[in-house]
Amino acid sequence: MRFMAAYDLMETARNTNAWLGATARTMGSYPATALSLNPGFQMLAAWGEVTERAFNRMVAKPDWNIPPIAAADGHDQSVLVEKVLERPFGDLLRFHVNGREPKARRILLVAPMSGHYATLLRSTVVSLLPDADVWITDWHNARDIPVSAGKFDVEDYTLYLAEFMKHLGSDLNVIAVCQPAPLALAATALLAERDPDAQPRTLTLIGGPIDPDAAATDVTDFGRRVTMGQLEQAMIQRVGSKYAGVGRMVYPGLLQLSSFISMNAETHARAFRDQIFAVAGGEASDHDRHNRFYDEYLAVMDMTAEFYLSTVERIFKGLEIAQNRFTVEGKPVDIGKITKVAIKTVEGGKDDISAPGQCVAALDLLTGLPDEKKASHLEPDAGHYGIFAGGSWRRNIRPLVLDFIDANSDMPASKKIAPADAPAREAERSAPAEGPDSVPV
């Protein structure tokens, strides 16, 4: 598998399917077909439209498209996406609200780097922006990073997070979603040892595999079944000649996407079948529920081979975070050294990616943190997607997280901002439709 030919073969297959879809859509849309009473032409055009869009989305990075924020005087304030720090493997972005005074809440969203772009958290950003200044980690697609930029593994990821936190200052509140939860915890511990004044004020860990062995899922079962040698041989490929990262060893996004879809194959097949019938019947639109969800879900990115392999080996198999044995640059990172950062965990009762128990395990590692600075929440009916961007997040979890941030703020109580219902309603309108609830991130 570790050859450019394998990578180029997948890209060729994707291109071919996109071309077949475009061809079918064109053939089924000729005016002459309207003279026939055979509905097959409509179905052909509908199948082609859905297929072409699906395969073209796989190599396109989605736009942020953040809607304007309503000011107190009723005027709309536009939102600009600004690069605060630029690094080879990821940038720190700020969502700047034009004409607005700085908010008391300052939040860094740590987006997952597990196959999808940071835009997967678009609705999370929209829900927080009315009540906070928001930054986010924007990880780059490994296929576009030249080999000369070097490696990027879990230790480099942790150092990036520590740098971003330090840059934003100690009045920062960090929210890490899924995959980065253990590394965000490690980055906080790293700052606690090396630069205590740069630690964030609060850290919220949402649905992350702090201790993968605490509750079994298909993800953890897969990690236990395969050896690192099997994983490297089966999953790692070399970027082909089409991209700037030619020659870089990666875990391809297209391969990851096939794993995502296989976990809920029946649900995805039914969704695409229904969409074809909707298009044929004239009931679909460019921004309907299906397209809003799958435009994001199908947009995948490559991960560096060393990041993917070190995540499996050190976080899932070696349990280095779960057993407090994680090291960075050869030096141990002691999670017990965190003594003043308030930490909250959030889990979904129906999460089949990071099952309940995996994330809350972080609190047992915080031996130096007083109990009053620890908190946890289990959302009984929420799946993986729901706890950070779905209805459960907007209605229940978001207010709890903002309350947690406020409770650990230095501001006088009279100056704290009360969570409003309006941001949640706006986020619900702009969020992608919730397709399969267990969106792996």
Image (cartoon, rainbow, N blue to C red):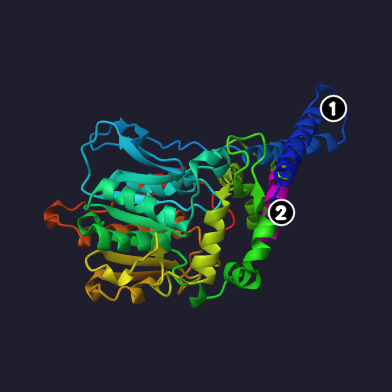
- Point out residue 133 in the picture as x, y percentages from the top left corner: 28, 44
Vertical comparison of 128 with 179: above or below:
above
Dot 2 corresponds to which residue?
A: 269
C-alpha separation, residue under disc 2 versus residue under disc 1? 28 Å
Which sits earlier in the primary sequence, circle 2 or circle 1?
1
Taking the magenta stretch, the answer to whether it contains residue 263 is yes
- The reply to whether the C-beta atoms of the residues labelled 2 and 1 are less than 8 Å apart is no
Given residues 43 and 97, the one toward you in this image is 97
Q: Is residue 38 magenta?
A: no
Give residue 54's quadrant in the image.
Answer: top right
Label placed on residue 33: 1
Q: Nearer the viewer, residue 240 or 387?
A: 240
Q: Which corner quadrant of the image does residue 436 belong to?
A: bottom right
- The segment highlighted magenta reads 262-275
**Magenta stretch: dominant secondary structure:** helix
Q: In the figure, is residue 251 to the left or right of 76?
A: right
